Amino acid sequence: MFMRVSTQFHQPIRTLALSVFPWLLALDAQAQLSGSAGIVSNYMYRGISLSADKPVARAAVNYDGTSGWFAGGQVVTGQLAVETHRSAQWSGYAGYAQRLPSGLSWETGVTAYAFPKNPNWNFREAFIGLAGDTLSARLHYSPDYLGLNERSLYGELNGGWVLTQRLQAFWHGGYYYSLDNARSNRSEARLGLATSYQAWRAQLSLDLVRLRGGTATDIYGKTSGGGGEVRHVIVLTVARAF
């Protein structure tokens, strides 16, 4: 889920960070340490709600080193479908990024996800990525996704453009592929607008997901219908940088 280009290379794709990683709302191209705190109407992760379709509070921090190393993390008051109450969901990442002579930037790193109330769901991923001025691509691999005994690959493309001084448009597309359970495969997308005023940031997006066979795992819950029905969700994010 995490994919970061170090802030020393981040300026060309700054319009994309808000769309795909709302917890990085506080990024400043000149800062080494940044953060944000806010509210999300529905915490969507790769097309699936990790908050039982409820609003969540979220806080994040990010550090960028001058030599290309970066790290960060976030905590969310999430709630999976099988949970009866909210609990903290932690995630953190670390990696290295560099700019190529062509002007593109590449990065690689690892991400860890932790569910303190349900440690069996903890998992890790490795990622690689390539980013240009208006487009970025990433590939993630997990040897045991969400503790489901599934090796997984997740590929994504992200893009964005400036509409006005304060308004940006963005899009995201991703595909989750399980190497061990074809029923877990799914495609998802996000389209939206982002804006900012002083330290405040906001974005509104339409998230869509198509699950194979119309169902998800028990951890995610069930979707209505079958045959790969497309589900859509409107998501509002408001946060303040610090």
Image (cartoon, rainbow, N blue to C red):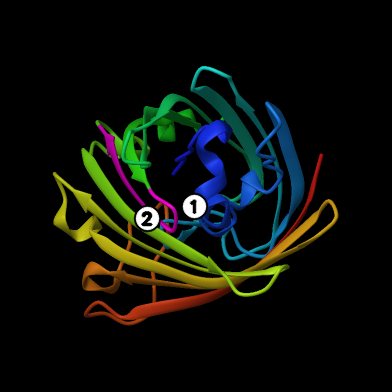
Residue drawn at the location 41% of the way across and 58% of the way down = 158
Image location (x, y in percent) of residue 85: 65, 49
For residue 167, above or below residue 149: below
> How many numbered callouts?
2
**Image quarter (top left, top right, bottom left or bottom right) of the C terminus:** top right
Residue 98 visible from this viewpoint: yes
Badge 1 vs badge 2, beta-carbon distance below 8 Å: yes
Q: Quadrant of residue 174?
A: bottom left
Mark 1 neighbour class, 10 Å CA radius: few under 14, some 14 to 19, many 20 or more: few
Q: Secondary structure at mark 2?
A: loop
Check if residue 26 falls in the magenta segment.
no
Report the span colored magenta: 132-142
Q: Amino acid at mark 1?
A: Val
The residue wearing badge 2 is: 218
**Left or right: residue 157 compared with residue 88:** left
Q: Which mark is residue 82?
A: 1
Q: The residue tagged with tag 1: helix, strand or loop?
A: loop
Residue 48, percent from left and from top: 44, 60
Task: Give the spatial CA distance, label 1 vs label 2.
Answer: 7 Å
Q: Is residue 89 above or below residue 160?
A: above
Residue 134 or residue 188, whichever sits in front: 134
Q: Residue at x 69, y 33 (%)?
A: 30
